[in-house]
């Protein structure tokens, strides 16, 4: 190899093989550099083969065959760098001390034929080898480790936009303009709908809309566990059992969940007599005996009675001596079973407010309903019940109570209902009037559909207020 400061003469050995046909392969080694190029020379080639001189950084390094040079970058061979001569038949002169070493030299990608090799040798050396040499290829970057994470269905790659079947709702898919409105309710609305051949539908009448709105209020969902609602009265004969039955029927008739009314009266309660049921039914005592063995609603349905509105009633024991043994622990056992299968549990309590069962009833109460008759002494006893609750640590229950003014006799009451209602509104949250109904006054079973419209409306309004109060407390 010639140095940068001298030009080779015609007689000098430029490192070109005199007889290329004598060797099968020739290896080209470059000292002081970081790359090695291996060249394969075909055997028996003529002297006029298309050969050019290889110049790297302005210095002659040997001969290569045009078109035979492989373009991939060769790996650095440290052993070849340490050798003093090129492997093969070519002798390479040592590199002078003042020669600039080639750093990270890249193999020539595309060899271009040169007509005059001497012109290449006589060319001025490149001053800046780094600038003349092609930019080194970027070093390969190691692929990062990919953590394999298990994904649920719908979270796989490309599946994030997939929808599940529950998104195909009627509100989304059905065209409102193509839907047929239901048959309207109301005298004039239905008449116009009929005579027009079902082509004119102006919707429900005013009363029908009000009735459906009230039903929606009663049917509002109650999130969470079962809710307990005791019905209290300190005086018998004011209609406490009747109000319990009417409230339960109004709730069960409008709601989709289960409602039960438990007769916890220790003095032979008559709640089960207020609904139509088959004779020989079970009682609350039977549930107390098997409360640990109940495994499903089927076990409970064999004990309770059900009326036409789907209200379940758990009757008290017909023997008053046995019923007297019904304790607070018994009530808690019954309540625990009922809480697993019912959303609303109404309790018809006895008249003794200090009875042991009353303590367990009030402890579980989410809302209290107090019934008052329409007489002076009955109204006072109802007001005193609120006072007793307030003085015994149940002030919040007293203020959130619902007062029912029940008229159990026909005709106009002797008391002023407006004054009586105004009094209880200062002490409780809601006041509801329950009108007189001949079917109820007879003392037999109550058929909810046969009640007078005013009675059904009052019972449903009471049910709506109860549900709204329970929802407000849960919020």
Image: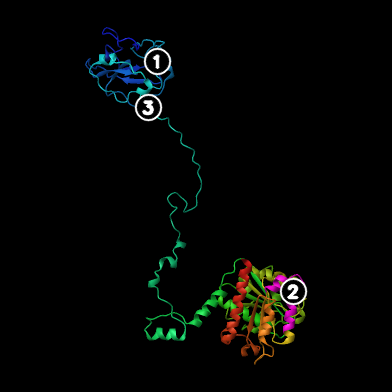
For marks 2 and 1 on the same chain, the one whose residue lies earlier in the sequence:
1
Residue designated by label 2: 389
- Quarter the C terminus occupies: bottom right
Q: Quadrant of residue 7?
A: top left
Q: What is the x, y in percent for residue 426?
A: 69, 77
Give the residues in magenta.
379-400
Magenta stretch encompasses residue 288: no
Residue appearing at x 69%, y 82% in the figure: 240
State if disc 1 and disc 2 touch (CB < 8 Å): no
- Quarter the N terminus occupies: top left
State if disc 3 and disc 2 touch (CB < 8 Å): no
- Neighbours of disc 3 within 10 Å: few (<14), some (14-19), many (20+): few
> Front-most of 380 and 288?
380
Residue designated by label 1: 100
Q: Quadrant of residue 42?
A: top left
Magenta stretch encompasses residue 391: yes
> Which circle marks residue 135 in the picture?
3
């Amino acid at each position: 190899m010639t140095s940068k400061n001298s030009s080779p003469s015609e007689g000098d050995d430029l490192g070109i093989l005199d007889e290329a046909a004598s060797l099968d392969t020739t290896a080209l080694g470059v000292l002081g550099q970081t790359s090695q190029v291996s060249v394969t020379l075909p055997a028996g080639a003529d002297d006029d083969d298309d050969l050019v001189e290889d110049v790297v950084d302005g210095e002659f390094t040997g001969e290569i065959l045009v078109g035979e040079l492989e373009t991939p970058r060769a790996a650095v061979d440290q052993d070849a760098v340490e050798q003093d001569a090129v492997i093969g038949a070519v002798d390479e002169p040592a590199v002078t001390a003042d020669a600039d070493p080639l750093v990270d030299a890249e193999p020539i990608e595309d060899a271009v034929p040169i007509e005059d090799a001497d012109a290449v040798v006589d060319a001025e050396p490149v001053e800046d080898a780094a600038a003349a040499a092609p930019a080194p290829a970027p070093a390969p970057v190691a692929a990062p480790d990919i953590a394999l994470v298990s994904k649920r269905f719908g979270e796989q790659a490309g599946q994030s936009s997939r929808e599940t079947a529950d998104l195909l709702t009627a509100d989304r898919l059905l065209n409102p303009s193509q839907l047929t409105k239901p048959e309207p309710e109301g005298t004039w609305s239905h008449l116009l709908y009929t005579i027009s051949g079902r082509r004119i539908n102006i919707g429900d009448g005013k009363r029908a809309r009000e009735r459906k709105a009230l039903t929606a209020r009663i049917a509002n969902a109650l999130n969470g566990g079962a809710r307990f609602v005791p019905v209290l009265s300190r005086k018998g004969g004011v209609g406490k059992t009747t109000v319990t039955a009417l409230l339960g029927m109004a709730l069960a008739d409008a709601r989709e969940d289960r409602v039960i009314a438990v007769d916890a009266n220790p003095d032979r309660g008559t709640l089960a007599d207020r609904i139509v049921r088959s004779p020989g039914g079970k009682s609350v005592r039977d549930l107390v005996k098997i409360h640990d063995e109940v495994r499903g609603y089927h076990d409970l349905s064999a004990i309770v009675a059900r009326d036409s509105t789907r209200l379940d009633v758990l009757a008290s024991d017909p023997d008053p001596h046995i019923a007297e043994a019904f304790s607070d622990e018994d009530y808690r056992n019954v309540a625990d079973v009922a809480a697993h299968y019912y959303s609303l549990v109404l309790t018809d309590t006895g008249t003794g407010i200090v009875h042991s069962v009353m303590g367990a009833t009030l402890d579980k109460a989410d809302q209290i309903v107090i019934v008052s008759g329409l007489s002076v002494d009955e109204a006072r006893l109802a007001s005193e019940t609120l006072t007793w609750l307030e003085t015994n640590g149940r002030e919040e229950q007293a203020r959130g109570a619902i007062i029912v003014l029940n008229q159990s006799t026909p005709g106009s009451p002797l008391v002023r209902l407006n004054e009586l209602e105004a009094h209880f509104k200062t002490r409780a949250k809601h006041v509801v009037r329950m009108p007189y109904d001949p079917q109820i006054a007879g003392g037999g079973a109550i058929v909810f559909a046969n009640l007078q419209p005013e009675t059904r409306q009052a019972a449903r309004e009471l049910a709506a207020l109860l549900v709204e109060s329970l929802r407000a407390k849960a919020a």
